[in-house]
Amino acid sequence: MLSQLVAGAKRGPQIAATENYVVITAVNRAGNLFAYSLDRKSGRWSSAVRINDVPEIAKEGFQAIASASPSVFHATWLDLREDKRNKIVMTTSRDGGRTWSTNRVVYHSPSGTVCECCKVSIAATGDEVYIQFRNWLNGSRDLYLAHSANGGATFAPAQKLGSGTWKLNACPMDGGAVTLSSAGQPLTVWRRENTLFTCQPGQAEQAIGTGRNITAATGPSDTAVVWDEGGIVWLKRNGNDPINLGKGQLPSVALTDQVAICVWEADGQVMMKIVHL
């Protein structure tokens, strides 16, 4: 059990699963990030393992986890080490979440800090690792994508997503998401001002609607995008028209080849809807 859990605005526990392990990560109010690992063969959970190797540096509470192979997991978060400015840091477990590598700084903004109140996202397969985050660079709050082709050992310079920019002296509290197709190609979704966009790295962004809190999931032959606008949660698949899922905000989605499973918040309750594809 983790006391004083940080949970607001998608800061809550994150989960990644493979055929061998299920790993859950969570942050407490002191700013420490812990991992819990389920060995599916034995059915046993591990004790909590702190994965930030400098204590109390994940104060914002935004973190994410992804699996890259049956036993390899990567975690990333907003980190205050060294200069008390938020930067992007990650670590890797190669034994299903039982132990974690020395933390690695992926990105440090030349302007001092990345956006403090927007969630970070991660997606991985094999040696390919992608981390999406909202930057704060020269007064702009744009989305950036960092890519590693060697399992997170090193990263190429982070690339800005889209051709437009969002000059904003405030935090939009909206980080978007990165997901991978069945072929391993990254797809990003994110918000600039009140418009929601999707794009692949190096390509022009495509507007898909208006709203906030957009996220996405990919399946064998489909992509599902969910967001909220005006107190209503919406689901959009590929080029189809959006579907009204009901009243609420802060949605999440998971996708199989048969259904999209959507969950969101509404009036202090967790709502769920299964949409058959």
Image (tube, rainbow, N blue to C red):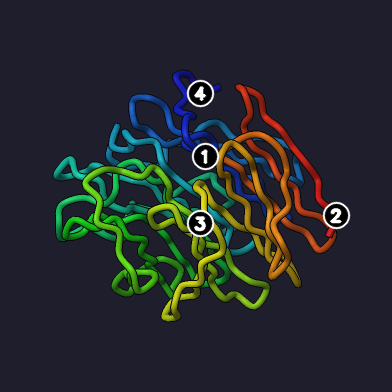
The vertical placement of 258 against 125, above or below, is above
Q: CA distance from mark 2 to mark 1?
A: 29 Å
Label 2 amino acid? His
Q: CA distance from mark 2 to mark 3?
A: 23 Å
Sequence-wise, which precedes: disc 1 or disc 4? 4
Label 3 amino acid? Ala
Pick whichever, 226 or 246, lies toward us. 246
Sequence-wise, which precedes: disc 3 or disc 4? 4
Sequence-wise, which precedes: disc 4 or disc 2? 4
Sequence-wise, which precedes: disc 1 or disc 3? 1
Camera-nearest label, 1 or 3: 3
Q: Pointers 2 and 1 in contact (CB under 8 A)?
A: no
Q: CA distance from mark 1 to mark 3?
A: 17 Å
Label 1 amino acid? Thr
Q: Regarding mark 4 in the picture, which secondary structure is present there?
A: loop
Residue on which the image places disc 3: 177
